């Protein structure tokens, strides 16, 4: 038992060191994968960065997986008919779940297990949502071969303990990206691509092809379409309604991707990418600065120009309580006044300021 606790302390210390380095998400995922493979005992894994507002995956880093199964994995994830989808785990109030525990020791009850995990030789899967402070920063799935047995309680305990610090590290990567230098030259906009109902690229203008190439991932996604395009397209096709997500390109430009079905569910999906506006970026900026839900409400009213007294009335708070929230907001954002706060949150690009301490 003491050895296991020592392992946990060592892993958590290493995660803190990685967080302090403020690596880009893809590199952070690769280093976390190498760090956790032995302590958690997995044979293959898949990491996703998310739009923290919607929770839609926007990037993928995978290792030791059969990438030809990616299309099927996406389909099973979006069908919503399994207790081990990332959304189902979140809805059930968990950060961490395994197929074995979700099915009470009967993994064959899981559609994902029957159609994907078992045929690929896996006996169990551990999934983690890196949710923190209202933001859905990322998620990961770790597959274990049948011969190695199922995940046990110490494995789940370690997974639970690493979830929050990894979420914090991912939140820091978003904040660093928001405050990073503006890319030169910017991605041409708008960029328009049309995908079919399975996420395969039907057509695209020159700007979209350039952007898709720039955001290419080593995983063999359907038709070479990156996760940032594939996820909203598949979500829009499934819902039969438009969806929108935010994503940061590898070279640091923030974009909004708007996916809309064409001629119903069978007509394909148009995905339009354009630079994110201050209003579209605002929810992300509030989450990335670590504001609590109440602080976010106060900050939104402050951005709209409401006085302390007005904010108190609208949120049914006392004036001193609002003042306390404003003080906390200014501290967390590194600003000295409401005017600086509005300039920070609503500028076309967040100015480069000293990032909040760890």
Image (tube, helix red, strand yellow):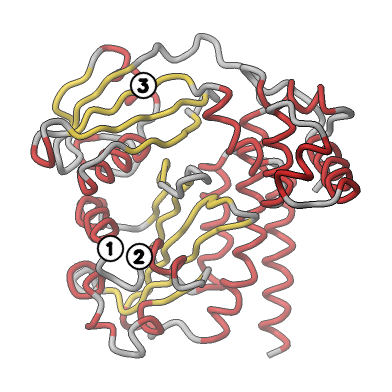
Q: Which quarter of the rendered picture does the N terminus lie within?
A: bottom right
Residue 53: image location, x then y, percent: 51, 44
- Pointer 1 or 2: first along the chain: 1
Residue 281 visible to the viewer = yes
Q: How far apart are marks 2 and 3 (CA)?
A: 29 Å
Which is more foreground, mark 1 or mark 2? 1
Q: Name the residue under label 3.
A: 211
- Pointer 2 or 3: first along the chain: 2
- Compared with residue 180, is residue 91 higher up or lower down, i.e. above or below? below
- Residue drawn at the location 70% of the way across and 44% of the way down: 314
**Would you identify the image quadrant in which residue 323 lies?**
top right
- Residue drawn at the location 67% of the way across and 66% of the way down: 11
Q: How far apart are marks 1 and 2 (CA)?
A: 7 Å
Q: Mark 2 points at which residue?
A: 85
- Pointer 1 or 3: first along the chain: 1
Q: Name the residue under label 1.
A: 80
Residue 290 visible to the viewer = no
- Mark 1 surroundings: few (<14), some (14-19) or many (≥20) residues within 10 A: few
């Amino acid at each position: 038992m003491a050895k296991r606790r020592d392992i946990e302390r060592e892993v958590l210390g290493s995660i803190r060191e990685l967080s302090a380095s403020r690596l880009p998400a893809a590199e952070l995922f690769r280093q976390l994968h190498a760090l956790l493979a032995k302590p958690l005992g997995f044979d293959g894994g898949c990491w996703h960065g998310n739009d923290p507002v919607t929770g839609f995956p926007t990037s993928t880093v995978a290792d030791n997986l059969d990438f030809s199964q990616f299309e099927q994995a996406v389909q099973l994830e979006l069908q919503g008919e399994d207790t081990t989808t990332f959304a189902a785990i979140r809805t059930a109030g968990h950060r961490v779940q395994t197929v074995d525990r979700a099915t009470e020791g009967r993994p064959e009850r899981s559609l994902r297990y029957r159609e994907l995990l078992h045929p690929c030789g896996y006996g169990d899967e551990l999934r983690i949502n890196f949710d923190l402070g209202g933001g859905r920063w990322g998620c990961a799935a770790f597959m274990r071969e049948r011969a190695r047995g199922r995940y046990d309680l110490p494995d789940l305990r370690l997974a639970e303990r690493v979830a929050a610090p990894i979420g914090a590290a991912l939140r820091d990567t978003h904040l660093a990206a928001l405050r990073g230098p503006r890319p030169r030259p910017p991605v041409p906009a708008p960029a328009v691509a049309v995908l079919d109902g399975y996420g395969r690229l039907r057509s695209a203008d020159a700007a979209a092809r350039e952007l898709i190439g720039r955001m290419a991932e080593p995983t063999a996604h359907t038709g070479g379409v990156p996760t940032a395009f594939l996820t909203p397209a598949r979500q829009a096709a499934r819902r039969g309604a438009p969806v929108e997500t935010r994503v940061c390109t590898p070279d640091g430009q923030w974009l909004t991707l708007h996916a809309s079905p064409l001629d119903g569910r069978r007509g394909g999906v148009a995905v339009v990418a354009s630079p994110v506006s201050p209003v579209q970026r605002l929810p992300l900026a509030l989450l990335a600065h670590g504001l609590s839900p109440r602080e976010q409400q106060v900050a939104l009213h402050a951005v709209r120009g409401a006085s302390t007294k007005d904010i108190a009335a609208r949120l049914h708070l006392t004036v001193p309580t609002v003042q306390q929230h404003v003080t906390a907001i200014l501290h967390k954002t590194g600003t000295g006044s409401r005017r600086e706060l509005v300039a920070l949150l609503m500028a076309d690009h967040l100015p480069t300021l000293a990032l909040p301490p760890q």
